[in-house]
Image (cartoon, rainbow, N blue to C red):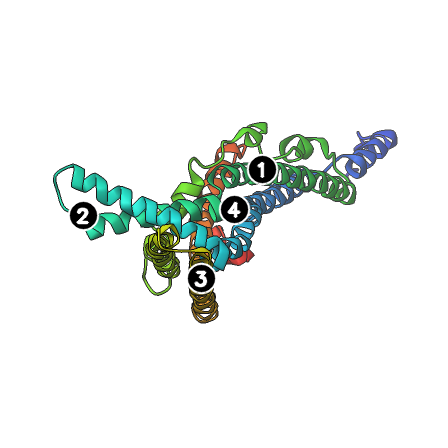
Amino acid sequence: MIAVPRTRAWVSTPTIALLLLWMVLAPLPAAADRLDAQSASWTAIDAATLHRAGPRLADSAISSPFDAMDRRVTAYSDWVFGWLSSLFTAWDLAYVGATEAAREIYDGGTPDPKSVHDRLALVVVERFDDTVVLPDQTARSLEAAWHRAMVRLAALDTQLATARRARIRRLATQLGTDPQPALQRYGDPLLSTGLLGAPAPAGLLQRAMLNAKEDAGGTTDEVLVRSLRPLASRTISVVTRLLMAPLVGGLVASPVANVSGTGAAIATLAAVSAGIWGLDYTVNRIDSATNRPAFEAGLRRIVRDAHTRASSIIRQEAAAAVCAAMLGAGCPSPSAVAAPGATR
């Protein structure tokens, strides 16, 4: 028989033990890759959340200024339909109309009813701005609302990053791998600090109020000019009293009028004036009860239309601001940004 020599085992027992220990303790490449992939997925989800939250937060923030504007419609309606306030306003409108007509006569022309009407309408529109819109105050409120929304968005980014880091650490512990590489790549906030300095949309209020449409298709000016109708009834009443005053005054100043005649003239003036004022008050109450609800509804439609337009504008601006501030990530498709009605 031919003897076959045995080969000695070249791997010693200590070497095998060290090899087995390394296989158990060393992180597997598959585990690290899995952690990285999952961290990237969480980061993408958080980025999409920020892209959606930016427009929604900005839209929600501007609701308060427009809600305040809506509440001020009542004060404007009080000015239009209120008996005493519209009485004083009638003087203003009569003065404006007379001044406009006198200017056209002075220029060698004849009074143009449309020109006088437009001048009176301008007075009413200016009063609407001063009572309901409050351009300066509302513009500041909208700008402050924008910055509050950006602060809230930055805070949300920080919260998402904190939660994301905790998830990365938990998964790394489960996989038995080092979390630091994934934390360095995916553990920081996704938005740059420049987001807090993003400028508010320029002229947002003016752009929102421009040519705001009614549901029925009318423009802002056409709705506001309705206020000339109740104010016109006040003007007629005032003019009537002005025409009567010289007649009664002449009676009082008449040389043949004695004390009894003067007293009768004063009593006549008081009686006629009381009758006119009583009729004027009654007509105003009927006019207010009949037309005021529709009048206010038309104005509130204007405010709602302006709010809708402002929502569209500020959502676009907020989406652009988030895209500009997003670190190392692209912008989603327009469909990823919720429609304006999603938050209201």
Q: Label 1 to label 4, Cα distance in Å? A: 10 Å
Q: Is residue 119 above or below residue 285?
A: above
Identity of the amino acid at label 3?
Ala
Q: Are marks 2 and 1 in contact (CB under 8 Å)?
A: no
Camera-side mark, 2 or 3: 3
Identity of the amino acid at label 4?
Pro
Which mark is first along the chain, 1 or 3? 1
Q: Is residue 190 above or below residue 208?
A: above
- Name the residue tied to disc 3: 264
Which mark is first along the chain, 4 or 1? 4
Across and down, in percent, residue 142 comes to 52, 40
- Name the residue tied to disc 4: 55
Which mark is first along the chain, 3 or 4? 4
> Which residue reaches farthest left?
108
In percent of the image, x 48 and y 51: which residue is there? Answer: 336
Across and down, in percent, residue 23 comes to 77, 37
Q: Are marks 2 and 3 in contact (CB under 8 Å)?
A: no
How many discs mark residues in the rendered view? 4
- Name the residue tied to disc 1: 150
Disc number placed over residue 111 in the picture, else none: 2
Q: Label 3 to label 1, Cα distance in Å? A: 74 Å
Q: Label 2 to label 1, Cα distance in Å? A: 54 Å
Q: Are marks 3 and 1 in contact (CB under 8 Å)?
A: no
